[in-house]
Image: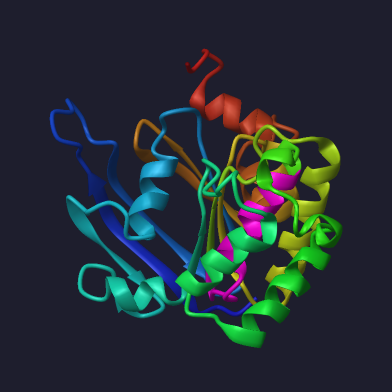
Amino acid sequence: MSGKTIIDINGLTKVYKGAEKPAIDQISMTVSENEIFGLLGPNGAGKTTTISILCGYLRITSGSVMIDGLDLATHKNDIKKIIGVVPQELALYNSLTAYENLRFFGHFYGLKGRTLKNRIQECLELFGLENNAHKKLNSFSGGMKRRVNLIAGMLHKPRVLFLDEPTVGIDVQSRNVILNHLEDINKQGMTIIYTSHYMEEAERLCSKVAIIDNGQILIQGSPAEMLKQYPKCSNLEEIFLHITGKDLRD
């Protein structure tokens, strides 16, 4: 991993209209190039709001975001060319085949012709979906749809890939395939920012994590650093529960 900062967030705040308090409140963090950075937190903690701002979907109330040296406030369109986004909700068309879905998203990212065709084929093979390329999405399992959803966000080989709960609600086999390939594409140089409820995933994947709750960063660092800071905890999940509490979040 290089030491270059690719994402620099300073005092980021988002207040939704009519809300009593900020959804995220003065958060600051940096992500290094070629890092897998985990943003972890309970339901409603501010993870999806943060990701949505970084992807340019939501306007900042205050604070600043720099991505690859570009200011999000003034270079949103330039930033969108170098990022990929895999949302928590499946952004796919059930009435289209896997190939047709990916061709649509490839065109959206400016890919075309043989370059697009070869890239779709490469990714379908990579994720074990080549035999289902021309089947409609409505016949796919949840895990298969998640894999297509992931491919759609990385077809154009972005420098930074944002993943919002990429393995939620899928079988163990699909989850393992996705995690293996996230590790592979990271080794090839892609920076990944990743939200999850699964602490064991974060411990496996992430070189650095930040735990967010009630819109504020409570702690950030490598899993190993956090375990040193909380010696009575044996893993990231225990640290997470210690910091955020054990009450249910509905």
Is 148 within the magenta?
Answer: yes
Q: Is residue 193 above or below residue 121?
A: above
Q: Is residue 76 above or below residue 246?
A: below
Secondary structure mainly formed by the magenta segment: helix
**Residue visible at 75% across and 58% down in the picture:** 134
* Residue 50: percent from left, percent from top: 38, 48
* Residue 35 seen from this side: no
172 or 202, which is in the foreground? 172
* Residue 133: percent from left, percent from top: 76, 59
Please indicate whether residue 121 sits to the left or right of residue 212 in the image.
Answer: right
Residue 119's quadrant in the figure?
A: bottom right
* Residue 35: percent from left, percent from top: 60, 67
**Residue visible at 50% across and 26% down in the picture:** 244
Please indicate whether residue 31 sits to the left or right of residue 102 in the image.
Answer: left
94 or 174, which is in the foreground? 94
Residue sitting at the far top: 247
* Residue 65: percent from left, percent from top: 30, 64
Is 237 within the magenta?
Answer: no
Residue sitting at the far left: 18
Magenta region: 144-160
**Residue visible at 19% across and 39% down in the picture:** 15
Structure colour scheme = rainbow
Counting every numbered tag in the picture gives: 0
**Residue visible at 68% across and 32% down in the picture:** 169
Q: Quadrant of the N terminus?
A: bottom right
